[in-house]
Image (cartoon, rainbow, N blue to C red):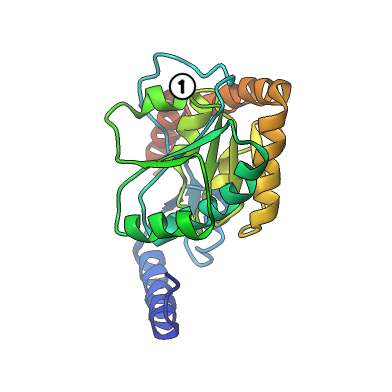
Amino acid sequence: MERSLPARVFLAIYEYFYFRTVERHSDVVVTLTEQDKQLWKKARRIDVIPDFSTMPINRLSDCTSKRVISVGRLEWEKGIGRLIQAWSIVCQRHLDWHLDIYGEGRMYHTLMALIKIYKARNLTIHTFTPNISQEYAKSSICAVTSYFEGFSLAILESLRHGVPCVAFDCPFGPRSIISDASCGFLVGNGDIRVFAERLCLLIENEQLRQDFSKAAIEQAKSFNVDVIMRQWKSLFESL
């Protein structure tokens, strides 16, 4: 559901005063990405320290299963409706592949209706599972269709499991994690057809998935907890 004009105006005003208040009273502002660093134009000091995942990983994906995974709340901002629309294109070409969505939220019934409207086949919406790691390990591609992301642990977690990711290049998280055409694909925000084509490209090319998988594991190492903690330690020691 799109926000109304009054809601968007109120949010813009709120964000403006929020940013300016924080800037006036902070010695340092820490952002998750280089992109949202640009929002803090008047801060005295701005550092970028990304998030990390401590999810235990017992098994990596071999990227051979005919399965795409998506993980996230069933809320408007996660753009699951856009994923269903893209999948309706993919499933026409690849009837032997399946999309599994893990999440809970207010849009469940709306999304179930969209599945029927777009005639999307081989698609299941699951509730959250306590062992999402094993679901990543059983998948070959991760799909992220959010309208915006603060950082996106789902992307980081998929890369840590060796699962290449296709994501909309939304503000601001995906670009800070995915190296485009190396460990996944970044797609223009909202370009449903290109998103579907990128999924199909990975589905149709197992060697490409394998190459992306190796790159994903290496990319994820730069977000290891010890790497991020060293950045926080350095920040506090400099204050």
Say which amino acid is labelled 1: Ala
Q: Position of residue 2 (x, y in %)?
A: 45, 72
Q: Which residue does the numbered mark 1 point to in the structure image?
A: 137
Q: Nearer the viewer, residue 187 or 107?
A: 107
Q: Position of residue 48 (x, y in %)?
A: 50, 46
Judged from this view, the residue extending furthest toward the bottom is: 6
Task: Check the image and name the residue furthest to the top.
Answer: 58
Q: As rendered, which of 138 and 21 lies closer to the eye?
A: 138
| Residue occupying image coordinates x 38% and y 61% | 110
Quadrant location, the N terminus: bottom left
Secondary element under disc 1, as helix, strand or loop, is: helix
Looking at the picture, does residue 60 appear above or below residue 172?
above
Residue lying at 72% horizontally and 20% vertically, measured from the top left: 207
Q: Quadrant of the C terminus?
A: top left
- Image side of residue 232 versus residue 35, left or right: left
Residue 167 position, x and y percent, is 58, 46
Q: Can residue 79 be seen?
A: no
Task: Choose between 186 and 208: the one closer to the eye.
Answer: 208
Residue 146 appears in view: yes
Whether residue 147 sits left or right of residue 54 in the image: it is right
The residue shown at (29%, 33%) is 129
Foreground residue among 239 and 201: 201
Residue plotted at (64% across, 44% down): 92
- Residue 37: image location, x then y, percent: 53, 56
Graded by Cα atoms within 10 Å as few (under 14), some (14 to 19) or many (20 or more), the crowding at tag 1 reads many
